[in-house]
Amino acid sequence: MPAHSPGPLLIIGGAEDKLHKRSILKEFVTSSGGSEARIAVIPTASSLGDEVVEVYDALFRRLGAADVVPVRPESRDDAHDPELLARLASATGIFMTGGNQLKLSAIVAGTPLAEAIVDAHERGVVVAGTSAGASIQSSHMVAFGVGGATPKQRMTQVAAGLGLVRSSVIDQHFDQRNRYGRLLMIVSQSPQLLGIGVDEDTAAVVTHEDGREVLRVAGRGAVTIFDGTHMVTNAYEAKRSSPLLASGVVLHVLPTGQKFDLTHRRLVPRAAEIAPEDAAEIAEAQQDMRQLARDIAAADRSPQALRARMARKRPARPARDSPTSPDGDHS
């Protein structure tokens, strides 16, 4: 059997647009197979019960999905249920809703249901999550904590995630709830982790390209990344609630369309965008240069030939009349 590439991950920072353009949710449905998409919704983190499933059922069907099924374990025993596991086995897309990420981790992590999500991802199924459903996709996840811009000792705690994005910790509602400090605190305590903060109505879309994990930003906001590979910190000795030393952290703020290489922890340069009229002019210049090269090779002609040829091809500019006064006299 041919080997499958891991499926895309859509890590959504919460509050994704559900009423207007719905660009992030559209990308999820399209990536899941469009009109043939079979989407499993995992609402375990939410306290809203069946209502949250009804919302996403209506959204995904409106966007063209063929089928939407709930997978709602309410206990770790439920996460062993063969019927729920079978629903994931036939899914082309898995969507985890927002809510309480510690509840989601406590019920799902380390169970057959978690293994089924990881297996689905590895065989090419699209896995998406918003808010709590975003945080659990990393190897480590924020369990809870306070906001604030300054990293302080014990301002948050960490729980185990699903590990779909390795060696990382993901936080959501990032800019809107000022979660810079708590994510930086985690990176200060564990500099090997890549800290990824995702704004609301924004997705970090992770795909595999040429053996690398590449993150692309989609949506209205930005993705903030803290790389503490070479940082200096006092997190190991700082007293309770005191500000932390965090020096040498590499900061990346990535707007929509930007890419980041998670494997090598570096920015992916954005390809230059060329306007159609500029592209035509460049193509014409390239053709002229190729012709000049042939001329020089054939007859040892000088580069003046190119200038003469271009002058012949350049359209003549219409002559400008001298400005005149209203009665026809030159001013």
Image (spheres, grey):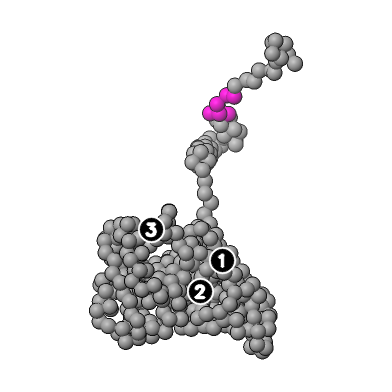
- The label nearer to you, 3 versus 1, is 1
Residue on which disc 1 sits: 176
Q: Identify the image quadrant of residue 152.
A: bottom right
Which percent across, then down, holds residue 185? 60, 79
Q: Is residue 287 left or right of residue 307?
A: left
Label 3, label 1: how many angstroms apart (C-alpha)?
23 Å
Q: Identify the image quadrant of residue 251.
A: bottom right
Range covered by the magenta-colored residues: 311-317
The residue under the point 32% across, 87% down is: 77
Amino acid on which disc 2 is placed: Ile
User: Does residue 314 show up magenta in the picture?
Assistant: yes
Q: Residue 26 got which mark?
A: 3
In this view, the residue farthest toward the right is 331
The residue under the point 29% across, 74% down is: 88
Label 2, label 3: how many angstroms apart (C-alpha)?
23 Å
Amino acid on which disc 3 is placed: Lys
1 and 2 marks in contact (CB < 8 Å): no
Q: Residues within 10 Å of mark 2 (few under 14, many from 20)?
A: many
Q: Residues within 10 Å of mark 1 (few under 14, many from 20)?
A: few
The residue under the point 39% across, 72% down is: 48
Residue on which disc 2 sits: 170
Quadrant of the frame with the C terminus: top right
Q: Residues within 10 Å of mark 3 (few under 14, many from 20)?
A: some
Earlier-in-chain disc, 3 versus 1? 3
Q: Residue 119 got which mark?
A: none
Residue 6 visible to an observer of this rendering: no
Quadrant of the frame with the N terminus: bottom left
Which percent across, then down, holds residue 16? 45, 62
Q: Identify the image quadrant of residue 58.
A: bottom left
Amino acid on which disc 1 is placed: Gln
